Image: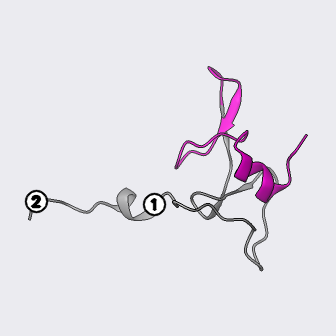
Amino acid sequence: MDYQTDMFSIINNKNEIPDKHIPKGVKLKKREMWCPYCSKPVMFIKDKAHGVKRCPYCNISDKDYYVKMVNRNWF
């Protein structure tokens, strides 16, 4: 057994093809956004070095096209 599976390798799989819509029945809480790469609701954390917010799981920025498209955050 060369490879040991841990919890984070199972949970934090980044989608190769990001989600285009939030799934039906999903209600986002205040300050939550849908991460199209993780396929789950997350609270993006502020990255002070770059002046953006990032997903704590996959590290994608809130300035990413698909994050903006799914969450309808254009401004």
Residue 29 percent across, percent down from the top left: 79, 60
Horizontal side of 12 relative to 49 (left or right) equals left
Q: Residue placed at 10% from the left, 59% from the top?
A: 2
Looking at the picture, which amino acid does disc 2 mark? Answer: Asp
Quarter location, residue 1:
bottom left
Looking at the picture, which amino acid does disc 1 mark? Answer: Asn
> Which of disc 2 and disc 1 is earlier in sequence?
2
Residue extending farthest top = 49
Quarter location, residue 61:
top right
- Magenta region includes residue 65: yes
Element at label 1: loop
Residue behind mark 1: 13
Q: Residue placed at 71% from the left, 53% from the top?
A: 66
Residue 8 percent across, percent down from the top left: 39, 57
- Depicted 43 relative to depicted 54: above or below: below
Q: Residue placed at 79% from the left, 54% from the top?
A: 69
**Chief secondary structure of the magenta span?**
loop
Magenta segment, which residues? Answer: 47-75
In this view, the residue in front, 17 or 34, is 17
Residue behind mark 2: 2
Q: Crowding at label 2, few (<14), some or many (≥20) Cα neighbours within 10 Å?
A: few
Residue extending farthest left = 1
